[in-house]
Image (cartoon, helix red, strand yellow):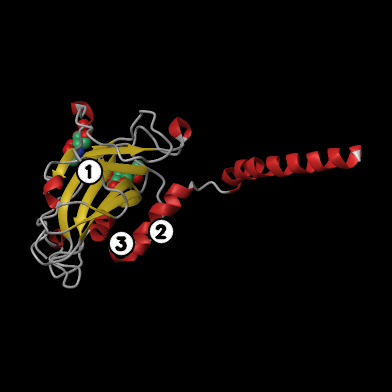
Amino acid sequence: MRTSKLMALAASLGAALALPTELLQQPLGDATPSSFLKVQQELRKAEIIPTVIDDFLPSLTLTVSWKKDAADLGNTIKPKRLQKQPTLLLYDEAGPEGLSSSDLSYVVTLTDPDAPSRDNPEWSEMCHWIAANVSVSQKTVSILPMPIFGMEEVDEASAPDDVIEYKPPGPPEKTGKHRYVFLVFAPRNGTTEPLHLSKPEDRQHWGTGEERGGVRDWARENDLVPVAANFMYSQHKKQ
Ligand SMILES: *[C@@H]1O[C@H](CO)[C@@H](O)[C@H](O)[C@H]1NC(C)=O
Ligand SMILES: *[C@@H]1O[C@H](CO)[C@@H](O)[C@H](O)[C@H]1NC(C)=O
């Protein structure tokens, strides 16, 4: 009786212990944090992969925030909330031991593949922003990428350099929801030298002159590879 009681106790303890052990072992077996898989999955679901960019697995996290809203992998934000240049925060969930380098400078782009509408993207893609010299934040950030609101104290020294200035999303009337896609790129060869980026001649078609010509072509031309992304939808209030 006593033995079996002890055994039952041991068994229930074992069961209770099994869960945390499993949870602890999971990240060791799979080096890819689930948040990166989630970003990839959402990009595929919204057909940003493969329409806008070839398939890739992010290695950094990007938050994009305006005064009252933040891009959150496919939420919908009113155009009037997007008028000012947003605050970008790029960070490495692995912290200082992560793969990112504080010497590398990253490039952030914003593109609209749905101009003037997703059904008829004849002006697509439209370049809304190219910001260079974006560095990985050294701040300690929560593991969960929480939207960060009201971050207005932009450190001037770390403000990005515009190759193409921020043009707020302005989806025309009756054109449905547009996807507004932020992509972060790193130099393919990992150089820490300043990048000499080409400036698209036109926002429309990113200067390629071709329908669907856009960020993928520009990144290829500049030897850049995608490392992070975020996106939201926006539409004109008259539909
Ligand atoms: C990025 O910073 C470097 C060094 O300060 C500068 O030479 C370069 O022009 C900057 N890039 C852009 C696009 O402004
Ligand atoms: C790395 O690529 C850039 C173009 O993105 C080029 O200007 C630079 O010379 C390359 N650096 C090295 C060390 O290969």
Q: Quadrant of ligand 1?
A: top left
| 1 or 2: tag closer to the N-terminus | 2
Q: Which residue is mark 3?
A: 48
Q: Is residue 12 left or right of residue 202?
A: right
Q: Amino acid at mark 3?
A: Ile
Q: Amino acid at mark 1?
A: Asp
The local crowd at label 3, few if under 14, some if 14 to 19, many if 20 or more residues have their Cα within 10 Å, is some
Question: Residue 41 bears which disc, if any?
Answer: 2
Q: CA distance from mark 3 to mark 2?
A: 10 Å
Residue 222 is at least partly visible in this image: no
Nearest the viewer among 158 and 43 is 43
Q: Which residue is mark 1?
A: 69
Secondary structure of the residue carrying numbered label 2: helix
Write down the quadrant of residue 181 in the picture. Answer: bottom left
Write down the quadrant of residue 216 in the picture. Answer: bottom left
Secondary structure of the residue carrying numbered label 1: loop
| 1 or 3: tag closer to the N-terminus | 3
Q: CA distance from mark 1 to mark 3?
A: 21 Å
Which residue is located at x 36 percent, y 29 percent?
Answer: 138
